Image (cartoon, grey):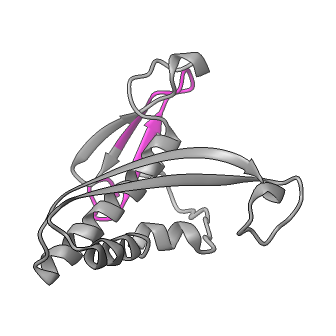
Amino acid sequence: MAGAEGVVVVRGGAKGFVQEVTAGRHHLVADEPVASGGTDRGPGPYELLMSALGSCMSMTIALYARTKKWPLEGVVIRLSHSRVYAKDCRDCVVRDDTLLDRIDTQVQLSGALTAEQEQKLMEVAHKCPVHRTLKSQIEIREVTGGAPS
């Protein structure tokens, strides 16, 4: 299973929070900050989630601009995660004391783009595959049949 395209394997011990992550042939470390009991050897789970979203948004913007031959020079995306009460969310369907996860994104484009091009790239950013996945209903299921290799 390790090394297979599209498969991520996470290994951790019973002590501490450090996790060794293998994604294909790439190796990463995830951890929690010292203030949360970790050793801060790597980004935390929510930072990795935001990294996935930000990377996908940036790649999607750049691909679209290249396809259109627009003069995009760079993309910077800042993301932050918070939890808010559903009753404080004006676009949310649920209105009660439930806490909802919120990811705020701030996109900065550089290059000699027109206002119309910038607007279109902002629209495209929110249509990236990871964004669509996070906004959809997600089924996470346990697959049995042996330990990951």
Q: Which range of residues does the magenta coloring cover?
A: 1-21
Does residue 137 sit above or below 14 in this rendering? Answer: below
**Residue toward you, 142 or 130:** 130
Q: Give the residue displayed 29% in from the left and 71% down from the top.
A: 118
Q: Depth check: 22 or 90 in front?
A: 90
| Quadrant location, the N terminus | bottom left
Q: Residue furthest right?
A: 96
Q: Residue at x 39, y 30 (%)?
A: 42
Q: Position of residue 31 (x, y in %)?
A: 46, 29
Q: Is residue 40 above or below residue 120?
A: above
Give the answer, above or below, for where 106 lies relative to 57: above
Left or right of 34 on screen, residue 130: left
Q: Is residue 85 left or right of residue 28?
A: right
Q: Residue at x 47, y 54 (%)?
A: 105
| In this picture, residue 120 sits left or right of residue 144 | left
Inspect this view and state whether residue 16 appears: yes
Q: Give the camera-side residue of 115 and 61.
A: 115
Q: Residue at x 11, y 69 (%)?
A: 71
